[in-house]
Image: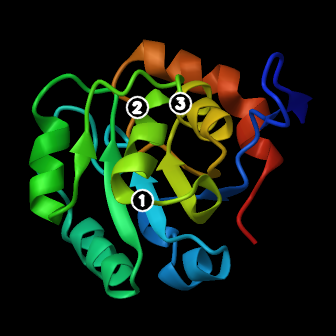
């Protein structure tokens, strides 16, 4: 763990707390055991592949189970287009787009809007250099999921450079 330069008592890490094959593998019971009251979701390659405007039934069923367990959901996406709003509407949850991750700004805004303290929140995302960094800087739990689909060579290269951090933590 690296101490964040200029951040009083804040610890920064590129390592996720837990790793999952899919967002749907994150069980509500685990979230409750972690003390999580709000699960912040990335969009692209976390809950849906790039360029789609639909969600698989298993994702909508999972989201319903999470909400039934009393855990709030909130989309925080770097996406500038319509996708965050479309998915938020499908799941009936709030959203922020243009979040600017790895900046923690969007994550902190979601915490503020939901009234959730950082230690009671987690972020589920597929990228180390955006999602994990933003979660670490915002002080929330980080749950890394495997990307749904590689759509271009640039993403594949980026994920390659994330491999050392991806291999470090696994869900037990």
Callout in the foreground (2, 3): 3
29 and 36: which one is in front? 36
Determine the CA span between mark 3 and mark 1. 16 Å
Which residue is identified by label 2? 150
Callout in the foreground (3, 1): 1
Of callouts 3 and 1, which one flags the residue occurring earlier in the amino acid sequence?
A: 3
Of callouts 2 and 3, which one flags the residue occurring earlier in the amino acid sequence?
A: 3
Which residue is identified by label 1? 115
- Identified at 83% across, 17% down, the residue is 5
Label 1 residue SS: loop
Q: Quadrant of the C terminus?
A: bottom right
Of callouts 1 and 2, which one flags the residue occurring earlier in the amino acid sequence?
A: 1
| Crowdedness near tag 2: few (<14), some (14–19) or many (≥20) residues, C-alpha within 10 Å | some
Label 3 residue SS: loop
Res. 163 visible in picture: yes
| Crowdedness near tag 1: few (<14), some (14–19) or many (≥20) residues, C-alpha within 10 Å | few
Which residue is identified by label 3? 104
Label 2 residue SS: loop
Disc number for residue 43 = none
Callout in the foreground (1, 2): 1
Query: How far from the left and from the top, in percent, is residue 77?
Result: 33, 35
Left or right: 46 as drawn, with respect to 170:
left
Query: How far from the left and from the top, in percent, is residue 50?
Result: 26, 34
Determine the CA span between mark 1 and mark 2. 35 Å
Q: Quadrant of residue 154?
A: top left
């Amino acid at each position: 763990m690296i101490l964040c330069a200029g951040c009083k008592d804040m610890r920064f890490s590129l390592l996720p707390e837990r790793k999952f094959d899919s967002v749907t593998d994150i069980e509500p019971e685990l979230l409750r055991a972690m003390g999580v009251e709000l699960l912040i979701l990335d969009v692209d390659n976390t809950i849906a592949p790039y360029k789609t405007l639909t969600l698989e039934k298993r994702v909508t069923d999972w989201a319903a189970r999470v909400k039934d367990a009393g855990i709030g959901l909130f989309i925080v996406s770097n996406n500038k287009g319509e996708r965050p709003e479309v998915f938020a509407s499908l799941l009936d949850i709030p959203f922020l787009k243009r979040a600017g991750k790895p900046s923690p700004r969007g994550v902190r805004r979601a915490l503020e809007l939901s009234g959730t303290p950082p230690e009671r929140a987690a972020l589920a995302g597929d990228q180390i250099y955006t999602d994990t960094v933003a979660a670490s800087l915002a002080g929330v739990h980080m749950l890394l999921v495997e990307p749904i689909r590689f759509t271009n060579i640039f993403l594949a290269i980026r994920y390659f450079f994330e491999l050392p951090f991806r291999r470090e933590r696994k869900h037990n």
